[in-house]
């Protein structure tokens, strides 16, 4: 039997699928390959998965309940497909309702109607903490004041999961990811935007006059935490933080990119953007206690690996990528 991974062509999805395949699992990957960002990048991620005999890919939308009901039964689900991005939710709110509400419900329905399914892990977000000023953010904190529609849909997913766990005895685990970065990352995220700008000599815009802190978490650590959660099902609904537990100033993160690229940034300061927050910071004590998970990648190392991937993938370096 296979593990269903939704969002398999996404940044986190590709890495999770690879890790599962490399330990001998069979994976059914699902993705709709939408054009929120460059589809060619998603196709290139899928090309990393295609050579593995244990991988099967289905192109479908998670909001298509009929498509999900036609999938073969899987023993476990890692639900990573979603409409991402805080700022885009101001432009296209309907995309968030369709993917993160209707789509999430469809995946829950697949899980409850699949005989023998033992666990579903799904991606939530640090955005659910809103403008919380108490740091670090704990899973025991109240999360009823989102500052973006994206955050509201992610919190709604947690509430739906809580209801389904109780109604249908489904073991469900939500993971609140904190600012994930690394090779194959999304073009709408700061690491990609900064690296591209610094490499090309274009301006880097720092919002809130640069006074921002993010709990950057390297992709390998996120994958390890996701699989640790998948391997430890418990009755009911649980939520964990997966974060670096060390908020970094955005200016320090930019400096690490400058060092890796070998060029100074042209910096422009801007105001705080609607829906954004000044700081994210994960309390991971509960995660470590339950899953034995601790992030292990220093920021400088993670940034160096990302920049190396970026320069190779976009043809500015001939140095080959290391094997996983």
Image (spheres, grey):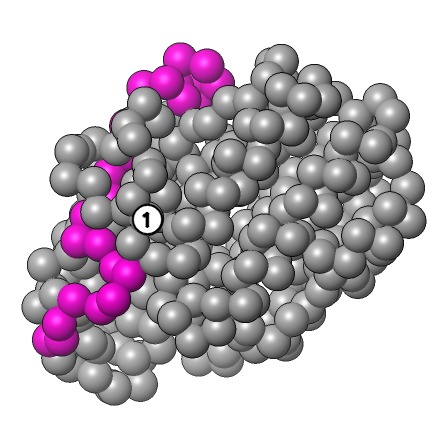
Magenta part of the protein: which range? 269-293
Q: Is residue 221 left or right of residue 58?
A: left
Depicted 157 relative to depicted 261: above or below: above
Report if residue 198 is visible in the image.
Answer: yes
Residue 75 locus on image (x, y percent): 80, 28
Q: Nearer the viewer, residue 212 or 109?
A: 109
Q: Nearer the viewer, residue 294 or 115?
A: 115
Q: Is residue 46 left or right of residue 250?
A: right
Question: Residue at point 80% right, 46% down?
Answer: 28
Question: Residue at point 21% right, 47% down?
Answer: 131
Q: Nearer the viewer, residue 100 or 40?
A: 100
Question: In which image quadrant can residue 34 be found?
Answer: bottom right
Question: In which image quadrant can residue 20 be found?
Answer: top right
Depicted 251 relative to depicted 249: above or below: below
Residue 274 locus on image (x, y percent): 25, 66
Q: Residues within 10 Å of mark 1 (few under 14, many from 20)?
A: some
Residue 144 locus on image (x, y percent): 33, 39
Q: Is residue 176 left or right of residue 142?
A: right
User: In the picture, which quadrant includes the N terminus?
Assistant: top right
Q: Secondary structure at mark 1?
A: loop
Q: Is residue 277 magenta?
A: yes
Q: Which residue is mark 1?
A: 146
């Amino acid at each position: 039997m296979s593990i269903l991974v939704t969002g398999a062509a996404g940044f986190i999805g590709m890495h999770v699928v690879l890790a599962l395949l490399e330990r001998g699992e069979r994976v059914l990957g699902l993705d709709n390959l939408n054009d929120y960002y460059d589809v060619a990048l998603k196709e290139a991620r899928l090309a990393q998965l295609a050579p593995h005999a244990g991988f099967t890919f289905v192109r479908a939308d998670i909001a298509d309940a009929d498509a999900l009901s036609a999938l073969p039964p899987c023993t476990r689900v890692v639900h990573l497909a979603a409409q991402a991005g805080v700022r885009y939710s101001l432009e296209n709110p309907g995309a968030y309702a369709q993917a993160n509400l209707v789509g999430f419900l469809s995946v829950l329905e697949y899980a409850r109607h699949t005989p023998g399914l033992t666990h579903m892990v799904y991606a939530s977000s640090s955005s659910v903490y809103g403008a919380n000023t108490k740091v670090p953010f704990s899973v025991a904190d109240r999360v009823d004041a989102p500052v973006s529609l994206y955050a509201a849909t992610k919190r709604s997913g947690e509430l739906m999961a809580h209801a389904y766990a109780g109604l249908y005895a489904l073991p469900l685990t939500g993971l609140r990811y904190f600012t994930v970065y690394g090779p194959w990352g999304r073009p709408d995220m700061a690491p990609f935007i900064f690296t591209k700008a610094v490499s090309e000599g274009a301006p880097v815009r720092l919002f809130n006059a640069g006074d921002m802190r993010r709990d950057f978490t390297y992709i390998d650590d996120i994958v390890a935490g996701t699989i640790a959660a998948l391997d430890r099902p418990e009755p009911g609904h649980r939520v964990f933080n997966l974060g670096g537990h060390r908020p970094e100033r955005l200016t320090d993160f930019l400096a690490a990119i400058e060092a890796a690229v070998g060029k100074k940034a042209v910096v422009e300061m801007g105001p705080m953007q609607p829906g954004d927050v000044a700081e994210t910071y994960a309390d991971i004590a509960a995660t470590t206690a339950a899953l034995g998970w601790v992030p292990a990648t220093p920021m400088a190392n993670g940034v160096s690996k990302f920049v190396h991937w970026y320069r190779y993938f976009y043809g500015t370096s001939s140095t080959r990528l290391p094997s996983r």
